[in-house]
Image (cartoon, rainbow, N blue to C red):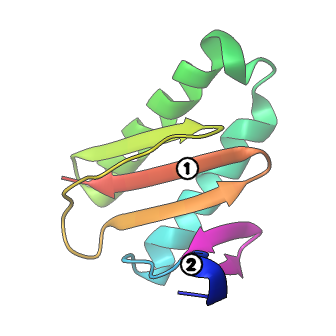
Amino acid sequence: MADGGEQEHSFMWGAQVRLPCDMPDDILKDAIESVRTELDAVEDFEGAGGNQVVERIKRKFDDKWNPNWCVIIGRSYGSFVTHETRKFVSFKIYDKAVMMYKV
């Protein structure tokens, strides 16, 4: 951890990724790019658009990287989860915090 108890981050593919990151680079890059693409396309994330974004990302990851992915996107949240090894990431993009993991 950095001085003052701050969480360390690394900028990757345009997102602020929380370290340590437990995800291979190919899946991580896909996660960041998928979230960015979906957020750029949605007009009203805070309304019904947010649920549709999360559902599309989850379905894409279930199809491409095998089920069962969980996707959380919001301005702020707390969490404590159990996940499959090498299948967890938490990052910030734009004004959104994102957590994706596979169970």
Please report the residue visible at 81 percent of the width from the left and 21 percent of the height from the top. Answer: 43
| Number of the label disc, if any, that sits on residue 13 | none
Instruction: Tell me the chief SS of the magenta region.
Output: strand
Look at the image and say whether residue 17 sits in the magenta stretch. yes
Whether 15 is drawn above or below 4: the answer is above
Residue count near mark 2 (Cα–Cα under 10 Å), binned few <14, some 14–19, many ≥20? few
Please report the residue visible at 45 percent of the width from the left and 28 percent of the height from the top. Answer: 55
Position of residue 44 in the picture relative to residue 57 (left or right)? right
Percent position of residue 63, x then y? 32, 47
Please report the residue visible at 35 percent of the width from the left and 65 percent of the height from the top. Answer: 88
Percent position of residue 24, x then y? 40, 81
Please report the residue visible at 55 percent of the width from the left and 39 percent of the height from the top. Answer: 73
Look at the image and say whether residue 9 sits in the magenta stretch. yes
Percent position of residue 13, x then y? 72, 73
Q: Nearer the viewer, residue 18 or 42?
A: 18
Percent position of residue 19, x then y? 51, 80
Query: Mark 2 or mark 1: which is in front?
Result: 2
Q: Look at the numbered discs 2 and 1 and tell me whether their residues touch, using CB distance below 8 Å.
A: no
- Magenta stretch? 8-18
Whether 78 is drawn above or below 11: the answer is above
In terms of image quadrants, where is residue 50?
top right
Q: Nearer the viewer, residue 15 or 24?
A: 15
Q: Earlier in the sequence, mark 2 or mark 1?
A: 2
Query: What's the distance in space between the residues labelled 2 and 1, CA to CA?
Result: 21 Å
Query: Is residue 8 among what the camera can see?
Result: no
Q: Which residue is mark 2?
A: 5
Q: Mark 2: which amino acid? A: Gly
Q: Nearer the viewer, residue 51 or 97?
A: 97
Whether 40 is drawn above or below 61: the answer is above
Q: Mark 1: which amino acid? A: Val
Label 1 SS: strand
